[in-house]
Amino acid sequence: MKTKQFRYSNNIFDISKTPTFVEDSSKDLKKIKEQIKKNVKRIRKAQAKLYARHEYSILIILQGMDSAGKDSMIKHILSGVNPSGFNVASFKQPTAEELAHDYLWRINKKLPARGHVGIFNRSYYEDVLATRVHPEILLHEDLPNIHSLNDVGDKFFNKRYKDIRHFENYLTRNGYVILKFFLNISKQEQKKRFMARIDTPSKNWKLSASDIRERQYWNKYQAVYEKAINSTSTKKNPWYVIPSDDKWYSRLIVSDILTKRIEKLPLAYPTMSPNQEKELELAKELLEDEGKY
């Protein structure tokens, strides 16, 4: 699959012109599921080497409107990854302890270790998304020189975009591969999924009144997503905007991008030094001879 069309590395992203659905995307659903299965197998093999070598880390960032398919994305494309080298972090409303630190403090604590694959189901981007739609949130964070809504404007958020670019460059230099995905769904598709959650008792728990209230800010969220993506897309750390009205097709795209990117790393199982090989031979001899004593 050609995925270049979903990649944004400079400020050319126009959310109003970006499709949320690809015609005939699931025309052959069986074939799509088979390809995802193959990708998952390749990811699993690559992750085993990543974990054994513990030199690089994969950080996957999933952003999107409510019901965009973030949870099911994780379930379907990383189902076979070794749980010892895999973790998921979700960032909700900051705690009192987290608010007592800078906004990236809690993020650093959840970064995947070397050799691990980590997913941020929502991320530090909420600090330039939700807070831009609801700037009043920032008035309760004891930030310097932020005392009224007049203090929260383009200048404030431009500094945060700069913080994020520098933070991601820093991580990249330290062996992190950052893959940023925006799961792009239409307002009509979100309504359809919300209705399904209401009509299906086993899915009722997934929906809250706050989810519905946030729909009234749809246009604002679209604008701030466009701004954030354009302001933080770089050649080293681009954004991938995934048409997500069709869940299976979005899973295929993301799994394909992840597969290709992780396989580009110089992955291999660690080689043994001459001294380590001698130690292994000694260990083998001891095991073979232990029944003699």
Image: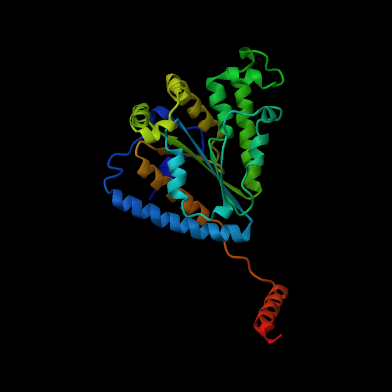
- The answer to whether residue 19 of the structure is visible from this angle is no
**Residue 244 image offset from top left, x and y in percent:** 38, 37
Image quadrant in which the C terminus is located:
bottom right
Q: Where residue 204 appears, x then y in whole percent?
A: 40, 31
Most extreme residue toward the bottom is 292
Nearer-the-camera pick, 179 or 140: 140
Which residue occupies 50% across, 60% down? Answer: 45
**x, y (%) of residue 256?**
43, 50
Q: Residue at x 63, y 44 (%)?
A: 111
Determine whether, in the image, residue 187 is placed left or right of residue 28. Answer: right
Instruction: Report the residue at 64% width, 56% height from top.
Output: 55
- Asked which quadrant contains residue 218, the reply is top left
Residue 132 in which image quadrant? top right
Residue at x 42%, y 34% (from the top left corner): 68
Q: Nearer the viewer, residue 170 or 61?
A: 61
- Residue 203: tell me if it is visible: yes
Please state the horizontal and vertical placement of residue 52, each as a whole percent of the image: 60, 61
Please tell me whether residue 46 is drawn above or below residue 60 in the rendered image.
below
Determine whether 33 is above or below 145 in the image.
below
In the picture provided, is 252 more to the left or to the right than 56? Answer: left
Q: How many marks?
A: 0
Q: Does residue 245 lie above or below 154 as drawn? A: below
Front-most of residues 229 and 81: 81
Q: Vertical placement of 259 versus 179: above or below?
A: below
The colour scheme used to paint the residues is: rainbow
